[in-house]
Amino acid sequence: MQWCNNCIRSCPKDKPFCSRSDSLRINVHQLHFGEEPLISGTKGSGTIFFSHCNLRCVFCQNYSISQEGKGKDITPEELYRICKELGSLGAHNINFVTPTPYTHKIIPVMQKLKKEGFKLPFVWNCGGYESVESIKSLKGLVDIYLPDFKYSDDELAVKYSSAPGYFENAKKLIKEMRSQVNDVVDEEQGLMYKGLIIRHLVLPGAVNNSIGVLKAIKEVLGLDVYVSLMSQYYPMHRACEYKDLSRPLTGSEYDEVCRSFEELGFNKGFLQELSSSSDEYIPDFFA
C-alpha cells in the first residue's frame, strides 16, 4: 500500500482524510487584496484557492471549498497557465491557498516556472499540519511561507480541527520553514520577497491557547519573526455546536492576546481592528 506524506496523517493514497481529487482541484484564482500588507501590496496577491483540506475546522469560513470540495479539476498545465495569467495581471506573488493535499502535483509546476525564469515569489499559505518531509520538499521553490499556527492546546486541536499532535508538529514546521527562508522585505515598496509570516486566529474562549502559541513561537524562533494576530473569527459552519465558538470574539479577549504579544517582546507583525461581525467579517490588517 502507498502512503501519502503531504501531512502528518500519513493516509493511504487511495483513501486520503482530506478527500482530495486525484487531479488538482481549485475553486477560484484571482487578485486578492485581503492578505497581510507585505503580501497583498498595492496590486494584489495572485491567489489560487485549492479545494479540500487536511484539517476539519468546525469554524472554517471557507468550508464549502475546504470540506465540501467545491471547485473544478484542472491539469498541471492549466495551473501553470493560471500562474502566468496572474503574473500578467500584475500580481505581486503567486499565493497557493490550502495547497497541502496537492503538494506533490504543485512542485513540478513551480519547478518548471522557476526553470523558465519566472520572477514572482511563490507563497505557501497552509494550515500548520503538514509533514516536515513535505515542507523539506519545497526548499528552493517556495519563497514565502504563510502558515497558520492554530493551537498550543492539543485538546482544542482535536476538538475543533480533528488534528491530534498539532502543537508539536507546528513547532517543527516553523523551524524548518525558517531554516529555508530569511526575511527579505522591500520597506519602500512594502513587499516581502522571501520570508516567513506566522498567522494565528484568536478564538473566543481560548485566550490561553493564543498566548501559548506566542510563547512557542518565541521559544522556537525568537522574536525576529513576523506574526499576524487575526481577530476575524466569526461563528460559521458548525461553530454553533460548541458553546465557546458560538459567539464572536470579544474586544477584551483580542486585547489580552495583543498585550501578551507586546509583553513577550514581539515587534514585527500585524494586528487587526475588531469591528462589528458579519458574514463578510474580514477586517483590514495594520502593522
Image (cartoon, rainbow, N blue to C red):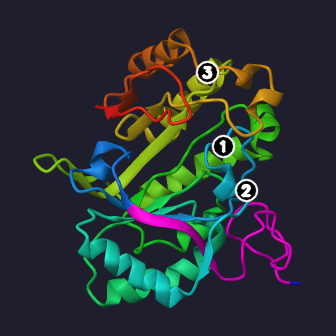
The numbered mark at residue 83 is none
What range is drawn magenta here? 2-30
Residue at the spot of label 3? 248
From this viewpoint, which residue is outermost toward the left? 188
Residue 46 pos. (x, y %): 36, 64
Residue 19 is left or right of residue 143, and the answer is right
In which quadrant will I find the C terminus?
top left
Among the two numbered marks 2 and 3 on one chain, the one whose residue lies closer to the N terminus: 2
Look at the numbered discs 1 and 3 and tell me whether their residues touch, using CB distance below 8 Å. no
**Measured along the vertical axis of the image, is residue 262 above or below residue 50?**
above
Q: CA distance from mark 1 to mark 3?
A: 14 Å
Residue at the spot 35% in from the left edge and 55% down from the top edge = 195
From this viewpoint, which residue is outermost toward the front? 279
Q: Does residue 47 appear in this view?
A: no
**Measured along the vertical axis of the image, is residue 71 above or below residue 282?**
below
Residue 31 is left or right of residue 232, and the answer is left
Kind of residue at disc 3: Pro
Q: Nearer the viewer, residue 14 or 80?
A: 80
Kind of residue at disc 2: Gln
Look at the numbered discs 1 and 2 and tell me whether their residues touch, using CB distance below 8 Å. yes
**Helix, strand or loop status at disc 1:** loop
From this viewpoint, which residue is outermost toward the top? 252
Majority secondary structure in the magenta region? loop
Residue at the spot of label 2? 67
Q: CA distance from mark 1 to mark 2?
A: 9 Å
Residue at the spot of label 1? 60
